[in-house]
Image (cartoon, grey):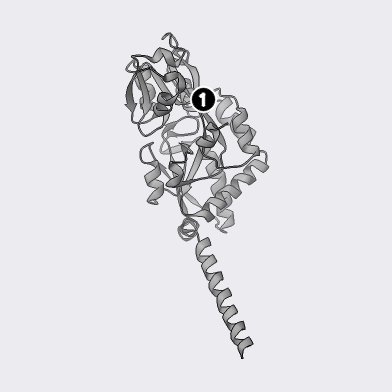
């Protein structure tokens, strides 16, 4: 009798444990995708060439194309014949809250993976490592942080760039005034129109905006590298199965050998809609991220 009861109790325990594990593994994001046949991708409007509007409510870019490849893999994983992708423009200020409240399911823009943000959202494995730099007018005479004393420095609301500038060791005693753009295009316009003397931002965004300017030769990227930061694709914090599905898709993309061609397409060749060339060479840090998949935050890069 005791052995039968023990067997029955063990069976109940196994069934209970299995149900708990199944509940833990359940993905609200994957469930929503499967039931609706749709997903909402957060995109940027002016983060050339990572994520930007190309006209007619269309979006493209390095991270946007990678996300399309990821979503195509997830579509196949879920056994869907089609998957409708809804594009939702986000800003530096609202991108994290929109992931948190479920308005967007995945964010494919230019978000730095930091320890602080990782408390609120998840980050997929890194496929782009950024260097934060300074853009100025070519005839400004500015070539270093020290020359920003008394100048107006533009950055985009909700980003970390000016904070990084203030924390840089060579910024000690360098007092400048901050001016804010609502998005990266607006911040660059502050520089272009003379309302700012410098624009501090990710190197790819600076290069993209300069390439897209009326007279690209009027601007240049100067000064010290303020920070090296992993730029991540954001996913919901409490959905490890969805994050795992995204990372599995990323591993397949890397293994397929597509990454060098994707880099050339978006950074070294003419891109739509104006056929500008950003001209940013592949960095050793980004190449290393491809071969050593990880979701380490910027703080880990700073320790090197």
Can you give x and y, in whole percent of width and height, for residue 300 in the image? 54, 36
Q: State left or right for residue 161 relative to residue 281.
A: left
Q: Where is residue 12 in the image (x, y as percent from the top left)?
A: 55, 78
Res. 38 in view: yes
Q: Residues within 10 Å of mark 1 (few under 14, many from 20)?
A: few
Q: Is residue 86 above or below residue 149?
A: below
Q: In this view, does 66 lie to the left or right of 158?
A: right
Q: Which residue is drawn at 59% across and 32% down?
A: 286
Residue beneath the point at 61% across and 36% down: 289
Quarter of the picture containing the N terminus is bottom right
Residue reaching furthest to the bottom: 1
Q: Is residue 236 or residue 299 the one in the foreground?
A: 299
Q: Is residue 103 visible?
A: no
Q: Nearer the viewer, residue 228 or 64?
A: 228
In the rendered image, the vertical position of residue 124 relative to residue 286, given as above or below: below
Q: In which quarter of the image is the C terminus?
A: top right
Which residue is label 1 attached to? 275
Q: Which residue shows up at 51% across the image and 52% down it?
A: 83
């Amino acid at each position: 009798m005791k052995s039968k009861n023990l067997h029955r109790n063990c069976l109940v325990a196994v069934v209970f444990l299995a149900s708990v594990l199944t509940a833990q593994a359940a993905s609200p994001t994957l469930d929503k995708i499967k039931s609706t046949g749709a997903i909402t991708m957060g995109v940027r409007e002016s983060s050339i060439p990572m994520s930007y509007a190309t006209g007619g409510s269309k979006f493209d870019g390095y991270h946007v194309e990678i996300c399309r490849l990821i979503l195509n893999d997830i579509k196949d994983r879920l056994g869907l014949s089609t998957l409708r992708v809804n594009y939702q423009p986000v800003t530096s200020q609202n991108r994290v809250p929109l992931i948190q409240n479920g308005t967007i399911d995945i964010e494919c823009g230019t978000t730095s993976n930091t320890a602080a943000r990782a408390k609120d959202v998840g980050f997929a494995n890194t496929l782009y490592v950024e260097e934060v730099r300074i853009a100025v007018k070519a005839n400004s005479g500015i070539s270093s942080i020290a020359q920003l004393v008394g100048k107006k420095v533009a950055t985009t609301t909700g980003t970390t760039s000016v904070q990084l500038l203030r924390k840089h060791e060579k910024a000690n005693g360098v007092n400048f005034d901050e001016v804010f753009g609502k998005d990266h295009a607006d911040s660059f316009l502050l520089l272009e129109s003379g309302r700012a003397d410098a624009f501090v931002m990710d190197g790819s965004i600076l290069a993209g905006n300069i390439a897209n300017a009326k007279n690209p030769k009027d601007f240049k990227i100067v000064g010290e590298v303020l920070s090296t930061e992993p730029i991540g694709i954001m996913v919901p914090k409490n959905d490890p199965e969805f994050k795992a599905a995204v990372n599995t898709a990323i591993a397949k993309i890397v293994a397929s050998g597509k990454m060098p061609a994707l880099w050339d397409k978006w950074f070294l060749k003419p891109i739509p809609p104006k056929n500008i060339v950003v001209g940013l060479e592949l960095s050793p840090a980004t190449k290393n991220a491809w071969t050593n998949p990880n979701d380490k935050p910027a703080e880990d890069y700073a320790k090197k």
